[in-house]
Amino acid sequence: MSSNDHNINFNIQIDNNTEIYRAIRKFSVEQASKHSNRKDVKQNLANALEKMVGNLLRGNASYHIAMNKNKTDKGTRYQCDIYKFRYRKQSLEILEELGFITQEKGSWKRQKQTTVYVHSSLLEYFSDYGTADYYFKRDEFIILRETTTTDWFKKIKRNLDYIDDDVTNSMREEVELINQMLRPLNIEYRSSSSSSISSSINTNVDTPYFPLVSPLCKDTSNNQIHRIFSHGSFDLGGRMYGAYWINLKKAMRQGMTINSEPCSEVDFSSMHIAQLYALDSCYHSDDYDAYDIPELFAMGVSRDGIKKQTQRMINKQEPAKSFSHCSDTTIRREFKDLDYATAIQPILDKHSRIEKHFYSGIGLKLANDEARIMIDVIKQLIKLNIPALPLHDALITQSKHAKKVQELMQERFFEFYGVPITAGIKHL
């Protein structure tokens, strides 16, 4: 069966009364019988396979699986229990032998869990069962995350469980509303090699560009978003992630179309800088460039390098001692021979009015406000039947609607902060 025969994505609805559940159970029992003659082992392995396959088909939040013998997974809102270590490991090996998944083995020393990439063949195997109207969707749209630092100074991110309340339920309803708008859209973009890639029902997920189907890959069928909050707080972070275009390079968004209509990208100018000035009831003129710093240009630093370092200064809690350990390759390359204090001083001078906010860790709070503004705008656009693809502080929409989107974005920022801002339009 070709992957073109169905819109084969994730979140196949699975419960005990569905045909696809019975197919998964039959598959699991057959595979368990092939690998053991002992009744108890077959039963345990079949149960593990059933949970594993069901979890993968649902597109549950994490494809990172703990393979530690001493770790007991009880199941969370993000991922179901995958049973005992022995059967978890064997289930993955069976699925890999069948060509349904690829494993990227984890490392205890590096505190990295095993990553599982799902092949389209797994989805194709079960595509005859249940409805063909599949779509990509996580079981959990609202993800609360915390970051811890190990003894090896490696940052580990893990999802936290939480108790739902009116706030989380409201946010989940908003995300589902946006996803309902996104699902039927035929979104196409042109890669750097000028080959058209589509997220329509005829998407070929086996193209050389996207050989795997997984949230960890830029699969064009993944047009659903979720929100990720940071540091265990719903007041920090909350940006929209998941949809494939969010991680596309700018060059690959050129020529993008929605329902065969040419698109434009409407984005706020220097969003986080503008937000910091707005906190002091201040704004800058339309021709103001927050990253135009001649002193750093003279040192060989590009505008992009200045922008990334400025964002880093907004997000970090304290200054670094050098640029050598920065994870961003642009910063590390362009600032590598510069003294840290000397290099950041022109940025502090450029933005002396908001200097107090640098190295305050305020970036996640700004991202939370930004997401709130963008979601409010998208909700207005949905009422007007105008499609809009979220892109952090920007929206991609059909060019014929770009002016209206620009107007609503600027209005909502003014309502939120009480100062104006410019949103630019760039035709793709």
Image: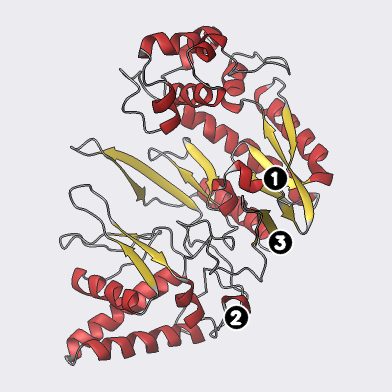
Mark nearer the N terminus (1 vs 2): 2
Quarter of the figure with residue 6: bottom right
Q: Position of residue 300 (x, y in %)?
A: 49, 17
Give the number of the disc on residue 131. 2
Q: Is residue 26 above or below residue 236?
A: below
Name the residue: 24% across, 86% down: 43
Q: Position of residue 186 (x, y in %)?
A: 71, 61
Q: Is residue 205 above or below residue 294?
A: below
Using a 10 Å C-alpha cutoff, classify the residue at mark 2 as few (fewer than 14 neighbours), some (14 to 19) or many (20 or more): few
Q: Circle 3 sits on which residue?
A: 186
Using a 10 Å C-alpha cutoff, classify the residue at mark 1 as few (fewer than 14 neighbours), some (14 to 19) or many (20 or more): many
Mark nearer the N terminus (1 vs 3): 3
Give the number of the disc on residue 396. 1
208 or 347, nearer to the observer? 208
Provide the secondary structure element on which disc 2 rests: loop
Q: Position of residue 358 (x, y in %)?
A: 45, 17
Q: As drawn, is 43 to the left or to the right of 30? A: left
Give the number of the disc on residue 424. none
Q: Are marks 1 and 3 in contact (CB under 8 Å)?
A: no
Q: Is residue 189 above or below residue 123?
A: above
Q: CA distance from mark 2 to mark 3?
A: 20 Å
179 or 399, nearer to the observer? 399
225 or 73, nearer to the observer? 225
Name the residue: 65% across, 53% down: 178
Using a 10 Å C-alpha cutoff, classify the residue at mark 3 as few (fewer than 14 neighbours), some (14 to 19) or many (20 or more): some
